[in-house]
Image (tube, grey):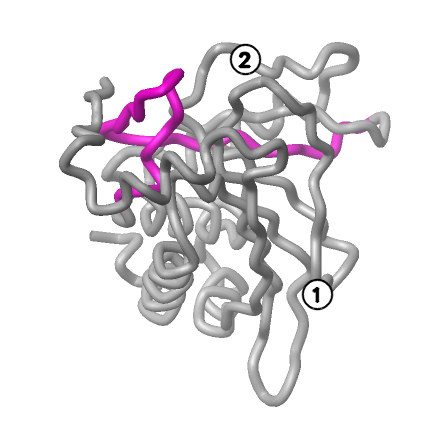
Amino acid sequence: MAQQLDIGNWHRRHHFEFFKDYDLPFFNLCADVDVSKLYAWSREEGGPSFFLASFYLSLRAANEVEPFRYRLAGDSVAVHDVIHGGTTTLRDDETFGFAYFDYGPSYRIFEVEGLEVLSQVRATTGPLNDRPGRDDLIYYSIIPWVHFTSFAHARKLGTGDSIPKIVFGKHSDKAGARLMPVSVEVHHALMDGLDVGRFYERFQALLDDPTSLTT
């Protein structure tokens, strides 16, 4: 479900009007997050899938930072009640497909369903199943081979796209912690650096207390 934002009373109305018709209205930030506690737990017997757990916690953080649920709808802004995730998944033939995961209050259900989705997509070939017309998503990419420090997405201009894009890179030990680079790209008409900063802060807080997955 989505409701319409009252733009006339929105404190960012002037910023929205300023940026919404830019040819390249997205901005991107890249920063490391500390995944030490989640990684350690995932290595224990019976621990969660590191990928699905980090994916789920990032979706939780994004749902809690309201502008990540905003989407352009012509000259209006739709506010989704809940947003879900779609990610690139390496297939058995070394191409990639798109896997989609519904966000909900139970991580246990999310992981069981997510493992099945990943298994199915890895075995596919051919079309990417890009689900055109659906915007209650965040698009994810996984680059597990590179601890990147910057990232740029392929872009099709003039489509009215406003879906945030998040990329996870290779996590590795640095300075006594296990760090993972995370790229966040968002539409500047819908949010600012403050909002992305709040996402990183909330994501890190969840990573620092991964047992919240069991509640």
| Amino acid under disc 1 | Thr
Q: Position of residue 184 (x, y in %)?
A: 53, 51
| Numbered circles on residues, count | 2
For residue 27, above or below residue 72: below
Q: Secondary structure at mark 1?
A: loop
Q: Residue at x 33, y 33 (%)?
A: 70
Tell me, for residue 131, which label it has, or none: 2
Asked if one can make out residue 107 in the rendered structure from this viewpoint, the answer is: no
Q: Splitting the image into 4 quarters, where does residue 16 fall?
A: top left
| Amino acid under disc 2 | Arg
Distance, label 1 to label 2, CA atoms, is 30 Å
Q: Which residues are magenta?
A: 66-92
Residue 22 among those drawn in magenta: no
Tell me, for residue 149, which label it has, or none: 1
Residue 89 among those drawn in magenta: yes
Q: Splitting the image into 4 quarters, where does residue 142 fall?
A: top right
Q: Secondary structure at mark 2?
A: loop
Horizontal placement of 100 versus 121: left or right? left
Q: Earlier in the sequence, mark 1 or mark 2?
A: 2
Q: Residue at x 45, y 15 (%)?
A: 134
For residue 53, above or below residue 37: above
